[in-house]
Every structure is written in C-alpha cells, then in structure tokens.
Amino acid sequence: MDHLDQLEAQSIYIFREAFARLKKIALLWSLGKDSNVMIWLARKAFFGRMPFPALHVDTGKKFPEMYRFRDHYGKEWDLDLRVEPCPPIDAVDPTLPPAARSAARKTEGLKMALAKYGFDGLIAGIRRDEEATRAKERVFSPRGLEGNWDVRDQPPEFWDHFNASPPQGAHLRIHPILHWTEADIWAYTKRENIPIIPLYLAKNGKRYRSLGDQDITNPVASNAASIDEILIELEQTKVPERSGRALDHETEDAFERLRVAGYL
Amino acid sequence: MNMIVTPASPATPNGTTRPQVRIVIVGHVDHGKSTLVGRLLHETGSLPEGKLEMLKAVSARRGMPFEWSFLLDALQTERDQGITIDTTQIRFRTNSRDIVLIDAPGHAEFLRNMITGASQADGAVLIIDALEGVRDQTRRHGYLLHLLGVKQVAVVVNKMDRVDFSAARFKDISDEISAHLNGLGVTPTAVIPISARDGDGVAMRTDRIGWYKGPTVVEALDRLEPARPLEALSLRLPVQAIYKFDDRRIVAGRIESGSLIAGDEIVIMPAGKIAKIKTVESWPVTPVAGRQGAGRSVGITLDRELFIERGDIIAHAGSAPRETRRLRARIFWLHDKPLAKGNQLLVRCGPKESRATVVAIEKAVDPGELSSSENKAIGRNHVGEIDISLSNPIATDPYTENPRTGRLVIEVSGRIAGGGLVLSVDAGQRAVPVDIVPVESALRSDERSARYRHNGAVVWLTGLPASGKSTLARALERRLFTNGGSPILLDGDTLRAGLNSDLGFSATDRSENIRRLAEVATHLARNGHIAIVAAVSPAREDRAAARRIADTAFREIHVATPAEVCEERDPKGHYKKARAGALASFTGIGNDYEKPEAAELVIDTSKRTVAEAADEIEQMLKASGVLFDEVVDLAANI
C-alpha cells in the first residue's frame, strides 16, 4: 500500500462508520476539490453510489463554472442532490467584518437545512493542514444544539473509535479527509482522474487555490496549468492555502469565532 | 484516527519516497513542548511565509515578548491562558523524513486530548524541564505511551540554559526517566539535552552542550521508524457493515491484520460459521484480483448466504480469534466518576459493541505518583486492571498476539470514557446478567401437572462411564412417556456435541459443563417436564452446584455399578483407550470419581435388570412427590 492507498483506506473506514452509526447523514458538497474527492471516496466506500444526500448550501454567489460543475456531475454521479439557499445578508450578525459576515450567512443556511431535514451527521471536507483551528478537530466532532463547536470540551478519540452519539437535537460533523493534505488531494485527484473545476488551473498568471464565494475569494499568482504543475508549486510554496480567502485575514480570531458558531 | 504508515511513496510530487512518521510531543505542562515545536519548525525551514513576522507583530501589539510557542497556540483561548488545550498537528521535513508533529497538551485537565494525539503516533518525544525534573505528568505520559502502544520514545531535557548546561543535572534526570521507562518496557531511543528557546541541541550541537555526544532532536526524529501494517499476523477482518445496494451482498470492513484473497476458506467469529470468499468487490473496477493486505478497506462476497452482522470478525479457519464473554484488560480511565466493581458499561472492540459489567478491579493506581497505593476503584486519569463480563460474546485476541484487535474502548453515556489493552481472554465464563428481564411462561405449573400427572423435576444420574446411566435414563424416559408424562433426556455427551462444544475436560470446563446441564434441566423442570440428566459428573462440588440451581426439584441417583464391571462393559471403548494412554482426563481408571454422600437413590446395575432399576426410580419419584399416585390423584379429581 502506498501513501494514497493508506489515506483512502482510512477515509473509507470513516465513511462506513458514519453510515453504520448515525441515522440520517448528508455530505456537504461545496463543489471544491476537497468535497469532490470526498464524494469519490464515498462511492468507493459504498461500491459506486453514495447512499445519502449531497447537500449544497448555496450562497448564490459561487462562480458560474462551479454551478455548471454541480449540475453536470450531480447527474453523472447519480447524487441525491439537495440545494438549500442561505438567508439574506441582513439576517446575519452585523458586528462581523464583511467577509466573515458573508461566511456566517452560510452557517445560517446550514442551520436552516439541518432544521429542515433533521440530519444527525454532516460530512464535511475540512483538513488539518488548512488552518490552525481545524488542526484541533476530531474525526467525529460533536456540535451543540445551536450547531456550535466546544473546543474546550472535545471528547477523547483514539484507535478509530469515534463518539457517535450526539445529544437529542444536536448533530455531529464527520471529517473523513481530516488527515489529508492539499498535496494529497491533488495527487489523489490525478491518480483517480477525478474531474475538477478549471478555475484551479492557472490562466494569465493566476489561479484559485481554494474556491469560495466570488466576492470573498481571490486568485493567487501562479503558472501551474496542470495538476502536475500544481504539485510542483505546492512542493516549493510557503504561501498558505487559504491566503486567497479574505475572511481568514480580517482579524486574528475571525475564523475561530466563525468555527465556534458552527462554520466549517 | 490512527493511520498506519509505511515507508512506501508518500504523495510528494517530486517522486521521492520519503517515509512519513507521526510523532507526538508529550510531557508535563510548561516544560516547553510548544516552544520546541515552534523552534523545530523554524530550524527545518517549515514555517509559512510571513507567519513568524505576523506573530511577532501580534506579540508587539499585545505588549508581550515573542514566544516560539505562539506559533502553535493559534487559538484565542490558548493564548489567553498560555496552555495547549487540544492536540495540534503540524507537518515538516527533516533530511530523510516527512514528519507529522502532534503537539499534545501537558495539563492534567486535558489528558483526554493527550491520549487522542498520542494514539495516532508512531513515536514520541517526552520533554522534561531541566530545572523541575521528572514530574507527575511526565510519569503519567510515559505510562500512557506504554498503554497506547507507542514504543519509540526520545527524551529531551529542555531549558538546559536554566541549569547552566550542567552535565551532572542532565545525568540525574536522564537516569531517573530511563529507569521509569525501562520499568514499563520502553527503552528511550535517545536522551537529549536542549534549550528550545535558544536552539541548543535542537538542530545543532552547540559548545554549551559540548559534553553531549548523542544525536540532536532533528537527528533523533530522523531515526524514528514508521509503524508497519500487520500483514504477517493472522487474518482479522472486523465487519463494519453488510451492504445490499444491488444484487450483491457485500461484507465490508478493514483488514486489521493478515491478508485475504478470493477462494480463501474463512470462519466468521464468534458464531464459528464457515464459508469461502467468492469475490473481492471494489469500485470503479470490480471484482479485484490479487491478495489484499492489512490496512485495506475491502468488501467481499461469500459463496453462501450466512447471517453475518456488524462486529463479527472474519478469520482464516484454524487461526480464528477466541470467542469469549469474559476479558481481563489494562485500562486508563478518563471519566469524572471513578470506575468501580459492578459498574455497567458499553465496551467496543473494533466495530463490535457489547454491554458489560466490571466484575473485578485490581492494581488501580495513579501512574503519575511515585509510590502509588492500590485502590478499589480507578479514578480519573488513573490506570488499572479490570475483569469484565460481556452480555454478548465477542471474538478478540490478547494484545500481545494482535495489537490491533487486542484493544478496547469503554463508553459511558455515549461518550468514550476509557480504553486499554486486552490482557487475556477467558472462554466459557458465565456472564453476569445485564438488563435481563426473564419472561414468564403463559402456562401455570398446575395446568401442566394436571396434563402430565407429575411435577417438574431434575433426575440426575451420576456414575462412572459405562455404569449404565444412559441405558437407565432411556428406560425411565420411555416409561414416563408411556404413562402420559413429559420426560426429556439430557445426555452429557449429546450436549457436548452442541451446546457445550466449546468446552474441554479441564476441571473448569467440566464445572461449566455441569452448570449448563443444570440450568437447562432446571428450566425444563420449572416448566413441568422431567429432565433426565445422564452425566458422569465426577466432582461432588459440581453436583452440589447443580442441586443449588435446581433446588427442590433435584433428585440425585448414584448409578453405583462396580468399576471392574464398568471397565468390562466399555461399550464406547473409552477404558481401553485410557489404559493405552490415548484418552487424557478420563474419569474411571483413577480415583477421580467422588461418590455422592446423600443421593436420593443408589442403584447397582450389575445386580438389577433395567426394568427393576426403572421400578426403583419410579417408586422414589412417587415417594418424593414428583409422580402423582394414581389413586390419590383420581380421588382428588372426583
């Protein structure tokens, strides 16, 4: 088994545990490279078809290429796709900086979707190497009744035994690719030939390393026009992956405040 | 999450094959873990651009001197308190390794997080403050590394600048911690003097520690080996789920050890059912050919339809794990409420779960204390050995035989509260009832006795092999049935072929064999039948136990045929084999049969015909109120 085989086997194990131990789960499909790898892994875990819904909490502000990708592959991969809109921006905490407020809107949309369907588990494609607060996550991460994350009181998790009993009315976040890196995602995408949104590849000296809403995501300077070139770029760069995400840089603790409130 | 990592090609895009090693940094609070991590990242050129400058700017803005530990303490709450709350993972590279560094909190309050981090590691760095020396949390973490199965441990003695780089102070600490770790069966790979703040000993040997000739921290990390999948051990495939998404019935799970291939003969434990692997299923290409080894998540189909459920273990016939309802485990305990004898829990062994009861607690100690006294309960953050009784049988291995399947976690109220290693597996022990609510029969006993014309009873025939027990039992059975009764024969050998097939002939197994016979017979007796038990049952104590179970329904009959006669009869050829030495533990030719002292009836079949003996038994049963006297009974019904 090589490195990618090991990552894959571990993720499949997590998917199967989530499906076996929770009653009603959904996968959060942000249309980005990470959640596309997740869907691929889920299809491996369940031998072809993902046996639970793909939930897209839609801000309405994604790139047109992303919507085209969703509509095409939602059909081709035979996904049970649920698109849920976010509330208007006025409904969101006005004390947050602009980009964080925009992201918080997504958290509200997620809460509404949770209330509507009653999911007890949401599968999310976060990774430990993306951002410092995400590094502290559990694979099965309990959320409070308000969807909040209590980082001070996380249960122990070891030897692939997960805490899978959320309190009545609360839900779990499940993180099947927590142990992957950005380079792992690209190497696996290439090996498995998983389709990607072309915005990740460089055009006119710029490319997107991470895709969010159009108004709060910026491209980075890059000439990497293929996955191979992206991998070489990642080998050399010291620029963090989310550097193009405005909300991470507004204030020192904006991201953490968002996560405590239930942001991914 | 505990990933097995092999040296095989990590996803480094330049095509190099660098081993990836996961290392946890542990030790007492404030001994400098986060500082060491920050320094390591800097020395290996692993910091993201601008990160150091950003943190220096933050420090200046807050009016405090820059600390290397700020690099890790990215969470607001941690900066405020200056302690690591939860595990952080950082990746960097040395000359020959890709390293995933897990920074675990040293504060006793957050031991659950230390365990979460350390359980994922291939190796550990145990950090000790040169000024403070070995502290309780140092010892506790050392002990937990042993329990978690982390065998490669490098020790660093930090803050050497605070003790003027004293070689003598270093040696004292080095000797103390080495002795402690050796006592746990862990040999440190290195003990290194450093100053994480100034950089001595981290990546460079400086003049100030010129007396030290061993490796630097970076060199020591370079020597740690990644864990290897357990392909050399016997096959263990714990079943996660059975999927029927289409016309295939796929048994899914991850191979924890060993390997498998289509065509293998397998056994499904604990039920012990046999089958053959038809295909190994996959996606997008299926089926897959070739051997699948430890670490793979697989799906298989079998050549026959069997009842399989989540938690079963698939193994190769001949090397299956043991089935048990009784375990001994060495555990650590994280729950606020101490674990005590009689506590009811949920135990998980891989995907298998079972309710369980703690039947004994031994060696409960605080591993942080030097001279810890033993307790009756295991307190929070303490360790101990426990015996647990499981309400469902599980299949497992002692951890010395299989470190992947030989471990368990304990849940309380849906939250993981402890975990540990399976020390031993005791087959055939009686489970302590947990949440058992017996269902009473719909019929009253007088309804049955009116029909059968007898009360329920356990007629227990004991005696040497070939003394005539089975012959008598069968004759009695026929006679009672002819009279309209409901006799049921429970022959010792017959039950050994099924119900008791897991038992051998050791003293313990014989006792358990008798106990089961008595339980089944008593159940029948309570429902109005006459259970006729024919069993050598040589031990007086075992028969006394059977009498206690059946209570007033018990009628003991000693079939006291002389030993010579029995040996001469020898219808099954057992005496001959035993004389030839081919039948170990055979009752009859030694002095191991303990005669009953107060049997309800004694019959020597060398002096009676079968019919005469049956008459005697019938008389005894009438006299002792089991069989209704015809006349009295008729009169009672007029």
Image (cartoon, coloured by chain):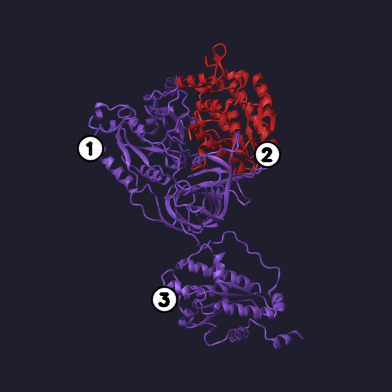
Chain colours: A red, B purple
What is the CA distance from the residue labelled 1 to the residue labelled 3? 68 Å
Residue under label 2, please give it: A118
**Residue depicted at 44% across the width and 24% down the height:** B62
Q: Is residue B432 above or below residue A123?
A: below
**Residue depicted at 71% across the width and 71% down the height:** B443
What is the CA distance from the residue labelled 1 to the residue labelled 2? 64 Å
What is the CA distance from the residue labelled 2 to the residue labelled 3? 70 Å
Closer to us: B394 or B52:
B394
Residue under label 1, please give it: B168
Quadrant of res A99: top right
Could you tell me which chain the residue with mark 3 belongs to?
Answer: B
B198 on left or right of B376 = left
Residue under label 3, please give it: B590
Query: Can you see residue B65?
Result: no
- Mark toward the viewer: 2 or 3: 3
Report x, y in % for residue A48.
Answer: 63, 35
Could you tell me which chain the residue with mark 2 belongs to?
Answer: A
For badge 1, the amino acid type reads Ala
- Mark toward the viewer: 1 or 3: 3
Q: Is residue B339 above or below residue B226?
A: below
Name, please, the residue furthest toward the right: B638
Quadrant of res A198: top right
- Please tell me which of labels 1 and 3 falls first in the chain: 1
Name, please, the residue furthest toward the top: A204
Image mark for residue B28: none
